Image: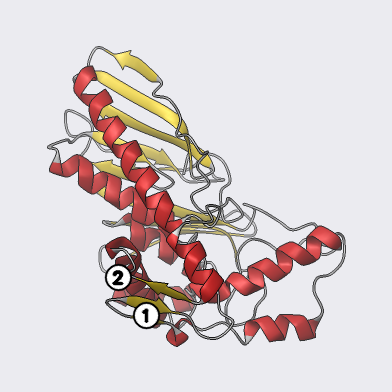
Amino acid sequence: MPHKAISRRRFLSLIAIASSLPTLAAAKTSVSTYSWRGTLMGANAHMTFYGADETAAIEVTRKCLAEVRRLENIFSLYQARSQICALNRSGTLRAPSHDMRHLLFICQQLYRNTKGKFDPTIQPLWTLNRDWFAKNPQTSGPPAALVQQKKALVGFDKIHIGTTRIELGKGQAITLNGIAQGYITDRITDLLRRAGWSNILVNMGEYYAIGSKPGGSPFKVQLANTSQTIPLANQALASSSSTGFVFPSSTGRQTHLIDPATAQSPQIWQSVHVSHPRATICDGLSTAFSAMNAAQIRANLVHFPKTSLWTQNKAGEISQTSL
């Protein structure tokens, strides 16, 4: 919710790119194929160009990585000078970038359409769990009173998104690691398309297939934590998995995923996989759907045409839904 053969999410720190981006490591798999592989956003990343001139592919890859670095300076929770850190510190961000405002408006749309199941203001609950289990491993979790205190801060409707400033509600903090990887994937995909590229499989935290393989056959991508592969062409794919990270609790039920309505980790699905023409939407929906049952998901899909969904229950069984 990407290298999808392995479990992923959400403990993987937001845009956890090393201070220096990985060097280009090209590998020609055929005369006309160029591949770049590295580690971005705390996960394996890659781009494979089919029918590509290697020199041109290397140059556009450098531009893509520069764009990732720029976006990291906006969204990273681990760079003190990033815009999201500045917002969380003071509760106000003056002169926000277009990207910050744009992504928050998308978050607002998802918050409303999912009836609050997607809500970036869960950050105080995440921080409470992180700090509690760091000091009190193998316990059942923070006291209920503390949980309710932090839960009272949750609510994206308390945020003001203006042209010249963004303001959080009192005591609030946000995390965008349920959607920023998708946003970055879309930005990279848009950059490549504007430059005239096609026939590329992109993985910048989420998958995106620009076009298809030469000859017209779709790319094949494996769903995280499953043996199932799906065709992908001009579509994105994002996954959320309850096994991505589990806090060291005595119950084994506290994970990186948090249901804003209950302040607890949802126990409905083992993994959720979403395909849509925009990776940002895929990423946000895979997060939200992790806290919804099948009926709630089906009712919510009416807001998001051209969406395909694969849910894996706790027994490992996979069901597909499309709209």
Looking at the picture, how far across and down is residue 9, in whole percent?
Answer: 56, 53
> Which residue lies most toward the top here?
31
Name the residue tied to disc 1. Answer: 113
Question: 281 or 161: which is nearer to us?
Answer: 161
Secondary structure beneath dot 2 equals: loop
Q: Quadrant of the C terminus?
A: bottom left
Question: 160 or 284: which is nearer to us?
Answer: 160
Q: Residue at x 60, y 53 (%)?
A: 316
Looking at the picture, how far across and down is residue 303, in whole percent?
Answer: 30, 76
Check the image and report above or below for 288 versus 215: below
- Res 265 seen here: no
Check the image and report above or below for 136 versus 260: above
Please state if 249 lies on the left or on the right of 100 as rendered. right
Examine the image and state in which quarter residue 241 appears.
bottom right
Name the residue tied to disc 2. Answer: 304
Secondary structure beneath dot 1 equals: helix
- Cβ atoms at labels 2 and 1 below 8 Å apart: yes
Of pointers 2 and 1, the one earlier in the residue sequence = 1
- Res 248 seen here: yes
Examine the image and state in which quarter residue 251 appears.
bottom right
Q: Nearer the viewer, mark 2 or mark 1?
A: 1
Check the image and report above or below for 249 versus 32: below
Residue type beneath disc 1: Asn
Residue type beneath disc 2: Phe
Q: Residue at x 17, y 43 (%)?
A: 193
Q: Residue at x 80, y 57 (%)?
A: 248
Looking at the picture, how far across and down is residue 31, in whole percent?
Answer: 24, 12
Please state if 261 lies on the left or on the right of 211 as rendered. right
Q: Which mark is residue 281?
A: none
